[in-house]
Amino acid sequence: MNYPSKEKLAKARVLVVGDAMLDRYWHGTVDRISPEAPVPVVKISREEERIGAAANVAYNVVTLGAQASFLGVVGDDEPGRRLEALLERTGITAHLKRDPELMTTVKLRVIGRQQQLLRMDFENEPDHEALALQNETFLALVPQHDAVLFSDYGKGGLAHIPAMIAAARAQGKAVLIDPKGSDYARYAGATVITPNRAELQQVVGSWQGAEGLAEKAQALRNSLGLDALLVTQGEDGMTLFDGQGQLHVEAQAREVFDVTGAGDTVIATLAALVAAGVPLRQAVPLANKAGGIVVGKFGTATVSYGELFA
């Protein structure tokens, strides 16, 4: 198999569009139960911030050695500014649209004894003016990139996705989508979408065995006019359904420490490789390997070129 050289990958440009999010972790010790209620008291000793959601997908592209631009909407608030600073620090080219009415999405996780004890979500949806600004910028950015990746976290940042897919495809760009929800009609015309098993079931209903899955997947692919559909199946690996039939890749056996962000890593790897000119069928086993590496790490993690091609 011809792997892209580090130099070739360094020239590949991926435009990531989607819901921006800041992941906050409060780490502490748990030594007692609260006298007020039967809950642990966590004495916070360390705070940590990471790029989350679609922004984490862009971070995965950069860590692998490709170039990533990130387009998303944030609030005019402290988390929005923190996210922008983190994006800049990691080498992602950020194009953030500010919506003064929006609360930048924050997931705050409280960690004690290496376990997540509580998660708090702060969020609301962006308004149409901010999304219209995002569309304008998108049209200007598409020609400068080799592939477009939409990471849908269902937070409202991709309300105009059908028009964006059409614009990218009209310019001959590969369009990869990590989908959300039960309405996949909005993803029609994409190159590939990457639902996991549970997400696909929400859309097509349940199936019996590998043949049943193939039937449902190919029917959905045809109805949406997709080049391919990649179904990620956790410990059962992943299967690509395309015009040639199907390609199944077994999961990489390793210790599973944390599955957070594994889907981000898979689609980011896929997009970076496709942007570097690697055909989908050759990119899938590598994306599968990247997902296997990242589940062995804690939190929303990433994979480097060295790790992937070791």
Image (spheres, grey):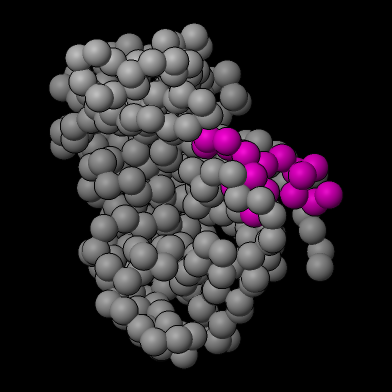
User: Residue at 24% across / 13% down in the picture?
Assistant: 35
Specify whether 51 is left or right of 1: left
Task: Find residue 136 and report its horizontal and vertical position in percent.
Answer: 31, 38
Foreground residue, 307 or 275?
A: 307
Task: Find residue 233 and report its horizontal and vertical position in percent.
Answer: 50, 67
Task: Find residue 304 and report its horizontal and vertical position in percent.
Answer: 71, 40
Please identify the quarter of the rendering in which residue 249 is found: bottom right
The magenta region covers: 292-310
Q: Mark yes or no: residue 15 visible.
A: no
The N terminus is located in which quarter? Answer: bottom right
Specify whether 4 is left or right of 278: right
Magenta stretch encompasses residue 241: no
Q: Main secondary structure of the magenta part?
A: loop
Foreground residue, 193 or 120?
A: 120
Please identify the quarter of the rendering in which residue 254 is found: bottom right
**Tally of marks:** 0
Please identify the quarter of the rendering in which residue 43 is found: top left
Magenta stretch encompasses residue 304: yes
Task: Find residue 204 and report its horizontal and vertical position in percent.
Answer: 29, 76
User: Residue at 56% across / 64% down in the picture?
Assistant: 235
User: Residue at 23% across / 30% down in the picture?
Assistant: 123
